[in-house]
Amino acid sequence: MREETAKPWLKLYPEEIPSIIQIEDKSLVELFQEAVQLYGYKSAVHFLGKELTFSQLYEQALALAAYLQKLGFLKGEKVAIMLPNSPQAVISFYGVLLAGGTVVQTNPLYTERELMFQLNDSNAKYMISLDILYPKISKMKALTNVEHIIVARIQDYLPFPKNLLYPFIQKKQQGVVVKVEHRGKNHLLSEIIKSGVATYIPVPINSKEDLALLQYTGGTTGFPKGVMLTHSNLVANATMCSHWLYKCKKGEEKILGVLPFFHVYGLTTVLILSVLQGYEMILLPKFDTEMVLKTIHKQKPTLFPGAPTIYIALLNHPNLTKYDLSSIDSCISGSAPLPVEVQEKFEKITGGKLVEGYGLTETSPVTHSNFLWTDRVTGSIGVPWPNTDAMVVSLQTGEQAEIDEIGEIAVRGPQVMKGYWNRPDETEAVLRDGWFFTGDLGYMDERGYFYIVDRKKDMIIASGFNIYPREVEEVLYEHEKIQEAVVAGVPDPYRGETVKAYVVLKEGAACTEEELDAFIRQHLAAYKVPRIYEFRSELPKTAVGKILRRSLVEEEREKQKKAT
């Protein structure tokens, strides 16, 4: 492998984007404090009609940090945050960092099984979650090392009279209102914030070494693995993003926060970027098409990072023409390939720019993107960001591939992770001589544009969510009537891909799709549950008995081709 790669893409950079940018050697905490100095008076968060300034966010995050320290919190300890996009999510993220801790972002859709694994693997002793999720997470005290649970309530950050009405709405939707008292090892975030910051002790942070985030992603063993991202990793990626969006003005933009913060894409391109640049975050607790359209119409966001399924849902809404989306100026789409018809239609309706980008959890996450205001190539993931190097490695020689030759994409740069938490073997397998081997197959054209053609990994991306077949298969194998099972991603016009399960039943057994669906939903989040089941007498295998997942995917594609 050649030590240095040619970088033809640099010739494509507009003059506003330098090939090498200055990335400050500062922690996320320091940059938050600087933002407060610059934009303290300015609105930092808009949430369903309620606003918080940068100064208010900082004071409340500081109160949480002081409270954690009072509980005996030590530098480097892990705090699991299980919250939707909300002011509490921002306060919790920076509160943990101010206390010198590491955030473990946790999907609120997780089942008890998934949650237990992540909490045990990360050794989180503290957890911050919504009141409605308390019954689920309280069980974790007996199954994990979690000692303290901090409970947040949505109504605490709603304007009058929404804050008074919310408990009644919650009871109607959920069937119950959960009440948690602020005592013992259960704590209310609202009470913590009232306690103030008098006892806070600043914590020194080494931005290049100290972990800011433990973000879980899939593993070759079938279990998720924690990606170790330092303060520097996340600062670098947000800084690159700010340079890519060179027409955006510091302190003036509004960014729509629909992408969940428990996904590193949302965390970096909404939360961290907003603080770095003094933008206002317009947060929505969940993706609801009508709510997103109304919010754009009323709040006039200028930036809207998202995923193809989000844009597709908006474009197909029956009341789309009733809303003014013309405030949208810039959108970078990630998580899945962006169909050209979606790009063109969205740009026509908004008058803004929508381009495709690429990244991974291990790279904080963005490495490539198309240019927003200059040259771009349909079907390409674009070119590497500043300070980022990339190459295609030949599958035959292990050396750098030729132009247009398909191989494994490898990247290096300051946004590349420190490694996998407690998994040195898996870290060594993907980090080699400073290069991160992505597991994605692609090629680079002569101009320096990169293209993804397939994945070495079997990961499924459905509606922007990463789904790992092995995890679903392990649940299927727990069903008493199943002899063999394999899960694969099959093309889906809306979700990009959807989960299909191929099942062989034990001799004499009978089972329905409905029975399997009900069983799996007890153990996995809804987005991981197969949407299609196919019962077979046998599965295709190699001579040594390995199930040929890829042949099933190809078979499915051929079926769909014949159907169209």
Image (spheres, rainbow, N blue to C red):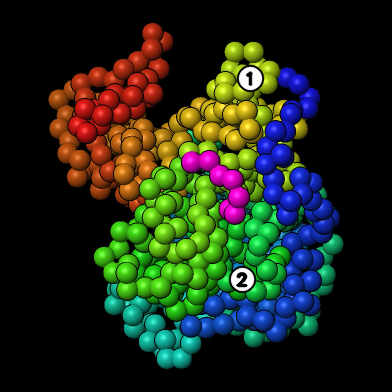
Mark 1 Cα-neighbour bin, 10 Å: few <14, some 14–19, many ≥20: some
* Disc nearer the start of the sequence (2/1): 2
Relative to 249, does residue 234 appear above or below in the rendering?
A: above
Left or right position of 370 against 411: left
Q: What's the distance in space between the residues labelled 2 and 1, CA to CA?
A: 41 Å
Mark 2 Cα-neighbour bin, 10 Å: few <14, some 14–19, many ≥20: some
Give the residue at x 73% y 19%.
1
Nearer-the-camera pick, 75 or 161: 161
Give the residue at x 57% y 20%.
405
Pinpoint residue 525: horizontal percent, then vertical percent.
39, 51
Q: Quadrant of residue 150?
A: bottom right
Residue labelled with disc 1: 402
Pinpoint residue 259: horizontal percent, then vertical percent.
50, 59
Q: What residue occupies the far top of the structure in this picture?
A: 543
Nearer-the-camera pick, 391 or 169: 391
Q: Would you say residue 482 sits in the magenta stretch?
A: no
Helix, strand or loop at disc 1?
Answer: loop
Give the residue at x 33% y 80%.
169
Pinpoint residue 373: horizontal percent, then vertical percent.
59, 54
Residue labelled with disc 2: 253
Left or right position of 114 against 485: right
- Residue 259 in sight from this viewpoint: yes
Helix, strand or loop at disc 2?
Answer: loop
Residue type of the residue flagged with mark 2: Glu
Q: How many marks?
A: 2
Residue type of the residue flagged with mark 1: Glu
Pinpoint residue 505: horizontal percent, then vertical percent.
22, 27
- Segment colored magenta: 372-378
- Residue 91 in sight from this viewpoint: no
